[in-house]
Amino acid sequence: MSDAAPAYKRVLLKLSGEALMGDGEYGIEPDVIHRLAGEIKELADANVQVAIVLGGGNIFRGAGLAQGGMDRVTGDHMGMLATVINALALQDAVEKQGLYARVMSAVRINQVCEDYIRRRAVRHLEKGRIVIFAAGTGNPFFTTDSAASLRAVEINADLMLKATKVDGVYSDDPVKNPDAERYSFLTYDEVLDRRLMVMDQTAVVLCRDHRMPLRVFDMGMPKGMKKIIVDGDEGIGTQIGFED
């Protein structure tokens, strides 16, 4: 364990399901999830309490099938189960790093993971366990981004990290527009007013109303999480918060 205090003691990391695919088109890429588990271990070794919310888009996206005619509630419930699959895979990878991990689901599925109970989740974190929140909020029509904001507020996280495939928030899609501007800092209201695609608006409003600091960063950046969370590097990604 590191003796130096990390810049942030308790964090919530939001990962999309697509982030687990690597270069594939479906499912979980073992190299990606093992690398992620290694980075989580670096945080745990630095005395950071780590909670994670995973999406399920690498396996199933409820909103997509709803557009194709499936009942939206049914589709969203299927998407919640996809996040449980991802959470169990990450739990296995984290435990292979020698850490203890707990999957807590917002829908009851007791034979494979725990129910989400806020006080129990906080206790797991205090004991140094990695806590992986699955099944979103347990309700249809709410994204896993909203679930991440909700869980970050509930566990009193010091920072919420949103992992993406680009190095922050841009004025436009940087893949399609090479002149797009990257922001180093934005207020929550700027994100909402400019309709920047950081997270869905429900998630952003929840962070704003509860003054939850948010950082958007490139998941592919080597040791990016450690630099932000442990070292307190403010030059990585886009910080979203309030003007001083």
Image (cartoon, grey):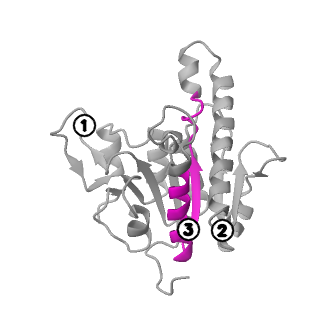
In the image, taking residue 152 as reference, residue 109 lies left or right, namely: right
**Position of 157 relative to 71 (above/below):** below
Determine which of the numbered discs, if any, sits on residue 41 in the image: 3
Tell me residue 172's x, y (percent): 25, 37
Marks 3 & 2, CB-CB < 8 Å contact: yes
Q: Mark 2 points at which residue?
A: 99
In primary-sequence order, the first of circles 1 and 2 is: 2
Q: Which of marks 3 and 2 is nearer the N terminus?
A: 3
Residue 87 located within the stretch drawn in magenta: no
Q: Which residue is drawn at 43% across and 68% down?
A: 226
Mark number displayed over residue 189: none
Instruction: List the residue tagged with mark 1.
Output: 172
| Residue 241 located left or right of residue 147 | left
Q: Can residue 33 be seen in this view?
A: yes
Q: In the picture shown, does residue 41 fall above or below 178?
A: below
Please provide the residue range marked out in magenta.
33-61
Residue 137 makes an appearance in the image: no
Q: Is mark 1 on a helix, strand or loop?
A: loop
Q: Residue at x 58, y 50 (%)?
A: 53
Question: Amino acid under label 2?
Answer: Leu
Between 96 and 52, the one lying in front of the other is 96
Distance CA(mark 1)–CA(mark 3): 34 Å
Judged from this view, the residue extending furthest toward the left is 179
Q: Of tags 1 and 3, which is closer to the observer?
A: 3
Q: In which quarter of the image is the C terminus?
A: bottom left
Viewer-side residue, 233 vs 119: 233
Q: In the picture, residue 165 is in which quadrant?
A: top left
Callout 3 crowding tier (Cα within 10 Å): few <14, some 14–19, many ≥20? many
Farthest residue in the front direction? 31
